[in-house]
Image (spheres, rainbow, N blue to C red):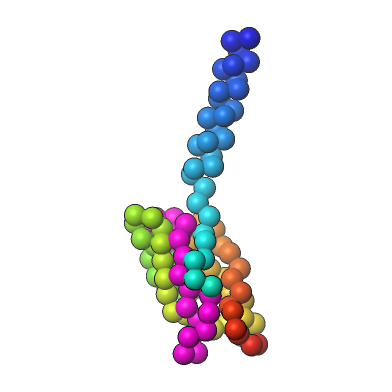
Amino acid sequence: MKKIQSASFAVALMFVAGSSAQAAIQIHVAAEVRDGMVFIKGNGAARGAPITWEGGLVATANNGNGSFSFFGELPDDCTGALSDGNETVSVEVRDCTS
């Protein structure tokens, strides 16, 4: 019985450690067109990580909470790749026409 409890605790500990270590990039202001550029604001990036949009450096994530915001080039297909070097997400730009 003691071995089962120890194994259950170890599995639970791995789950908690794994889930807290994985930050997911979240967009808080919908990617939108402003003056011919795209504006994006979000968090959940790796703290202090370089933020890239369509492969180009556009910002650095905040060291405290991983937040970021930037203006970037509007992609031709109205969908862009946002990355913090650990995770890349596809972002659709609102009110965009290709």
* Residue 44 visible within the image: yes
Residue occupying the far left of the picture? 63
Question: Could you tell me what secondary structure mostly forms the magenta stretch?
Answer: strand
Left or right: 60 as drawn, with respect to 84: left
Query: Residue 90: which quarter of the image?
Result: bottom right
Instruction: Decide: is 70 above or below 96.
Output: above
Q: Which one is nearer the viewer's eye here, 96 or 63?
A: 96
Pinpoint residue 30: horizontal percent, then vertical percent. Answer: 53, 73
The image shows residue 38, relative to residue 4, as above or below, that is: below
Residue at 42% x, 75% y: name it. Answer: 70
Q: Give x and y (percent) for residue 56.
A: 47, 74
Is residue 68 shown left or right of residue 9?
Answer: left
Q: Position of residue 71 (x, y in %)?
A: 44, 79
Up/down of 69 relative to 32, above or below:
above
| In the depicted structure, whether residue 32 falls above or below residue 8 | below
- Residue visible at 41% across and 66% down in the picture: 68
Residues rendered magenta in the picture: 31-50
Q: Is residue 47 magenta?
A: yes
x 41%, y 58%: residue: 66
